Amino acid sequence: MLADSKKQERWAQQKKSILSAVSYTLLTLWAMIVLLPFYWMLLTSVKSYASYNAEHTPTFFTLTPTLQNYEDAFTAVPLTQYLINTLIFTVATTAIMLFVIVFSAYAFARLNFKGKNLVFTLYLSLMMIPSELVIITNFATITGLDLRNTFLGLILPSVTSVFYIYLLKETFEQVPDELYRAARVDGTSDLKYLWKVMIPICRPTLITILILKVIECWNSYVWPRLITDDPAYYLVSNGIQEIRENGFGRENIPAMMAAVVVISIPLIVLFLMFRKKIMAGVSRGGIKG
């Protein structure tokens, strides 16, 4: 009996080891598939134009790396200006949006006013409207206000989000009501309660929203392309097309990849810095009440 028990235990351990090995192998293969485009982008960016065109079949390494493509990325087109424009757009839009959604979500989660459920239902119904229709309406509005080729015209249509308001409202509602009632008994105002209690408790969700909004702004393409035709207001997403058409030409792929690497670095660094908080916010979606 004891021998059989040891055999079963040994078999269970072997089975667990085999399953772990298979899982890690599959995860490693999947990681390689996911990272391959990034590796290819980085590799191509350090190849010279001549060596890249001389390749009859793609190679996964180079013996003569060069940084000339990165120098060209900043000299052929005003890439630095595009990065500054994108930074201004991203910071301003994200800051204003956080201000709007925090107060909106708090109002829907904690305040009682006539027609609240109806208003919130109408808010949610806006998510059913195709984005193309919203873009057309925003374009007509911004053009009518004579805000084309301005940072204000770029920023205004992106300063709120129904989805983020809904996500934050659900998170706020998970904070126990007893905290709110106790704060009110102590004479705490709604604004102070929001700042001192709700925001610190719901910080993971707020950080997740902040990171997602930054990524959204940094990768924004359609709206900036519609509302700006002045290179002085181009963002990096529009700058890639400008690089392709007027900077390096359609054939200089290594130089274009160098520009894409420069543009991608801020988002990669941001994700690496806040990856744990992002995962915490996504997995929790709030707190346990």
Image: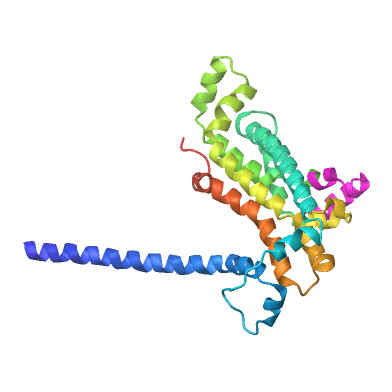
Residue at image point 78% right, 53% down: 82
Residue at image point 70% right, 43% down: 123
Given residues 176 and 47, the one toward you in this image is 47
Q: Residue furthest left?
A: 1
User: In the rendered view, does 206 fall on the left or right side of 146?
Assistant: left
User: In the rendered view, does 289 fall on the left or right side of 21?
Assistant: right
Given residues 172 and 34, the one toward you in this image is 34
Given residues 211 and 44, the one toward you in this image is 44
Total labels drawn: 0
> Which span of residues is magenta-colored?
134-155
Residue 42 % position (x, y): 62, 65
User: In the rendered view, does 13 fall on the left or right side of 23?
Assistant: left
Q: Is residue 275 visible?
A: yes
Residue at image point 63% right, 52% down: 267
Residue at image point 62% right, 19% down: 189
User: Does the segment drawn in magenta span residue 142?
Assistant: yes
Whether residue 37 is situated above or below residue 188 in the rendered picture = below
